[in-house]
Image: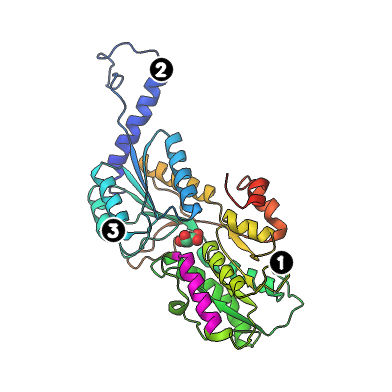
Amino acid sequence: MRKYGLAALGTAGLLALSACAGGGAGSGEDDGGGGGGGDTEAPEEVLVGVAMPTQTSERWIADGEAVEAGLTDLGYDVDLQFGNDDIPTQAQQIDQMITSGADLLVIAAIDGTALTSQLEAAAAANIPVVSYDRLIRDSENVDFYVTFDNYQVGVQQATSLLVGLGLLTEDGSEGEATGPFNIELFAGSLDDNNAHFFWEGAIETLQPYIDDGTLTVPSGQTDIEQAATLRWQQETAQRRMEDLLTSTYSDGTELHGVLSPYDGLSRGIITALQNAGMGPTLEEGLPVVSGQDAEIASVALIDQGVQFATIFKDTRKLADQAVTAAEAYLAGEEPEANDTETYDNGVLVVPSYLLESDIVYAGNITSLLVDSGYWTADEVAAGVAE
Ligand code: BGC
């Protein structure tokens, strides 16, 4: 039995009761209902705190809104907060959710290691914690994790780069190109556990090509620490790309591709490359740049032949999984995991539900993103969400 099973069952039970009462025979006898229940008091409210990291990237806004909508549909109250990419702000928001009596927390952390004391307080108050997309580390008080197969996302990012260079084809077979090619590597924020999975999946995919000389990293910056981008900031990536161009490419060395793990970084990198006179399109010699998240601005760039690819992670499905997990806990049950091995947070292996992702190329924008209703054709053409 889970530590909070009974408390959670209590509230869920009340909800169920009130739902029955609501649907039943008018109002009537407040008192006499044998065995209790049936009075006219408002049902006890169930509050879910949803903490998202930032509004600077559209995916987190969509994630937050989708989780909120799913929970609201089930009759729960929702306190949705965005942390402005600022660790103390997010910690404070979660503290506040706990003091306001949240029955469950859904958290996408800014810094995966910075929430230990909040999670202790949650555990002390029997509040289940669902870690959303980014694993919360160094705490035994994480109950469940919903995410994508993050290693596989990294594999897909590197694969798209290899396809862009012509070393592979979109169906995975060997391409016509032989290289050698020069590439540079970017990573995400080191305090985000995902950044390490993306990097590992990508580097293990690229390594054989580096080992046999097909790919070279002329800057020599091949450690994740050198490639990292604090808080996933676009300007930081743009600046690093500018620095790399100055330090390594001003002698005429050609750059063919850039591994980028997030669309915001990709756009910063592309701006740096274009400002240095490359492109402006792939056809006109812009290096191949990968991405992630299928942000509308990047999908438009892919459509225009500027950014080469991105990774589509359907955040609607992720939000659904978070809502399903929340519903299970609030009914005193365990959510169903499909992975109980991969995500060790430093203290325990957190039961997880992993979703799959897809590579988006210019040729499958319609089938992956438009047909599924993620973006409309008009949004793709305009490069902005409606
Ligand atoms: C998410 C990515 C996102 C990145 C930057 C990661 O934790 O998994 O989808 O691109 O954060 O927001």
Q: Which residue was labeled with disc 3? A: 88
Q: Percent position (x, y) of residue 334?
A: 39, 47
Judging by the rendered image, the residue that carries numbered circle 1 is: 170
Q: Secondary structure at mark 3?
A: helix
Q: CA distance from mark 3 to mark 1?
A: 43 Å
Closest to the observer, 275 or 353: 275
Of helix, strand and loop, which one carries label 1?
loop
User: Which residue is disc 2 drawn over?
Assistant: 24
- Say which of 3 and 359 sits in front: 359
First in sequence, mark 2 or 3: give its number: 2
- The amino acid at mark 3 is Pro
Foreground mark, 2 or 3, reads 3
Image depth: mark 3 or mark 1 in front: 3
- The correct choice, above or below, for 233 with respect to 250 in the image is above
Whether the residues at callouts 2 and 3 have beta carbons within 8 Å, the answer is: no
- The amino acid at mark 1 is Glu
Furthest residue in direction top, as rendered: 28
Q: Is residue 338 left or right of residue 348?
A: right
- Tag 1 or tag 3, which sits nearer the N-term? 3
Residue drawn at 74 percent across, 75 percent down: 175
- The verdict on residue 137 being magenta is no
Magenta region, mostly helix, strand or loop?
A: helix
Q: Which residues are magenta?
A: 232-246
Which of 17 and 302 lies nearest the eye of the viewer? 302
Q: Amino acid at mark 2?
A: Gly
The residue closer to the viewer here, 312 or 280, is 280
